[in-house]
Image (cartoon, rainbow, N blue to C red):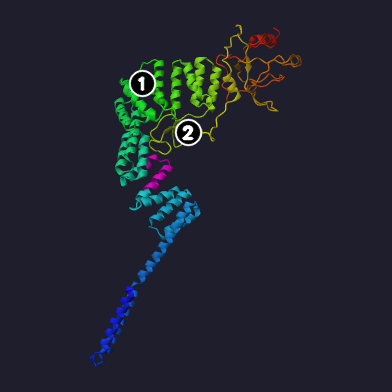
Amino acid sequence: MLRIVLFLVLIALAGAGAAWVADQPGDVVLTWGGFRASPSIPVFVLCLGIFAILIVLLWSIVTMIWRTPGRMRRRRHDKRHARGRHAITHGLLAIGHGDTALARRHAEAARRHAPNDPLALLLHAQSAQLDGNRDEAQRAFRAMAEREDTRLLGLRGLFIEAQRADDAVGAVMIAEEAIKLSPSSTWASHAVLGFRCARGDWSGALAILDSNLSAGLIDKQGYRRQRGVLLTARALELETMDRDVARESVMEAVKLAPTLVPAAVLAAKFESEAHQVRRAMKLVEAAWLANPHPDLADAYAHVKLGDAARQRLQRVETLAAKTPADKAGHVEGQLAIARAAIDATEFARAREVLAPYVNDPTQRVALLMAELERTEHGDGGRARAWTLRAVRARHDPAWTADGYVSNRWRPVSPVTGRLDAFQWQTPVASLPSDKGTTIESSAFEEAMLAAPPPKRVMAASEAPAEPAVIAPVPTPAPAPAAQDNAPPAAKEEPVVTPAEPVMPAPEAAESSPVAATPVFRTRADLGKPTQAPIPAVIPIVRAPDDPGIDDDGPSDEFTEQIGTPRDHATAQAGGWRGFWSRWGG
């Protein structure tokens, strides 16, 4: 509305001015050489306006002709830039969906149309990486590193290429240069920190950590935790070389990260050696409440040097009582009690704490039960059955980081180089696929665990206290047609089990040439009613998971078998007696 009013006002002023000029009387005389003109004032004003318009038009034409080459150059540049941007955009999209040929074609177009565009260099480098041309990718990243605006991006690309080429020295040099250029670069500080930790340069790693705190890459709480981790790693490395520095480092670490298990264990060890028992116990208790761990229980048990095994058991029971029953670490306390009870020969106590876990045992539970059977009863068969069960049992918690399982704590992950990555948890690969799924034991394991402890097998000259039978491992059916030059099957060493011998019926003994040989029962037949004997020779071959013969059993396969009088009357003796009997001696 305002523009309309202004336009009308201007029209009115122009009309008023034209009317005023038209009303003016008089003439204007112009003389130029022999030319003389005397127009009126309105005609003169009109001619003057037309002349001004002609001058303006002429100036515009001259200016347009003068600027035409520049405009043509800018137009060509804009077209090239637009084509370059189009190629860069579609090339990055092609890289995104993995089209190597299309990405390479757009990269070439971008390099022709926009050679100085940083995105064109990035497209060229990424298309070379996608195509597997590392030399071309490195040249592109070097060109980016030489530019001021893309230097950090070029260093990042060169760092990645050095890692792919397993050039650790070159990678760390590039990362250190990037840190000098930009101290707040997250990837560079992470890489340099991981490399210095891998080399054991804990002082340099601590300096990088301080730089990260100054640059605002980590908060105060994370800084305290990571500094505690690095100090613990340095203390563990210097424990046997420089105990003073190790003690100073671990005592600072346990103040910064009191729940860090290795720091608490090492600090408790130093305090125990200094006879500061109460202080050492407090350090272990603080870490135990946050993260129950077997190393903490062991450190708590040995916090006072020279104590007897029963005193260590009482101390471990005190520590386990501090763990709430609803926590996942409750089982760690029970296993620690069982371990200490076995050492103190309190076998009943050990069985009591392990009883809730024997139906679905983990590997540590099964191994503790095997040790308990071997220590308490000297039962090698039941101990081997529990050991075999431990192989198939669920995994216990372990130090795990990024899918890597380690038997000891480490400050950084060997997979990603991440600091403080190891956590005490159950490995993901060992978790059951369905909730409530357990690993069932075989019938042989159940029979071995349910049977009473076997009696010791005595020599042939001693009177047998109880008949025994040799139960071999079940084997697959023999091959239908073996070649003459085929190697003979390996013999299986017998396993002595407390089962009654199964002898063939009298009818079979009279009709079969091998009737005098005892019929062996397989593992699957243990605990089942006796069936009719099989008058055939079954080859005995060791199964892959068979633990072998009893520790107390006969080691010579030619030793005479100890059985009932019927066995002695019908079975052929082994050893030199059997050899002599075959020759009629």
Based on the picture, tell me whether residue 164 belongs to the magenta stretch.
yes
How far across and down, in percent of the image, does residue 517 sit? 69, 15
Above or below, 27 against 471 in this view is below
The quarter of the displayed image where residue 313 is located: top left
Q: Identify which amino acid the numbered label 2 is placed on.
A: Pro
The quarter of the displayed image where residue 159 is located: top left
Q: Which residues are magenta?
A: 155-174
Q: Residue at x 40, y 41 (%)?
A: 167
Is the residue under label 1 in contact with that under label 2 (CB below 8 Å)? no
* Residue hosting label 1: 303
- In the image, taking residue 27 as reference, residue 561 lies left or right, namely right
How far across and down, in percent of the image, does residue 74 sit? 37, 67
Whole-angstrom CA distance, mark 2 to mark 1, is 30 Å
Could one spot residue 32 in this view of the protein? no
- In the image, taking residue 465 as reference, residue 122 lies left or right, namely left
Q: How many marks?
A: 2
Based on the picture, tell me whether residue 385 belongs to the magenta stretch.
no
- In the image, taking residue 157 as reference, residue 465 lies left or right, namely right
Q: Residue at x 46, y 21 (%)?
A: 338
Above or below, 386 against 560 in this view is below
Label for residue 427?
2
Question: Which of 430 and 69 lies nearest the eye of the viewer?
Answer: 430
- The secondary structure type at the circle numbered 1 is loop
Q: Residue at x 60, y 8 (%)?
A: 465
- The secondary structure type at the circle numbered 2 is loop
How far across and down, in percent of the image, does residue 404 sit? 45, 35
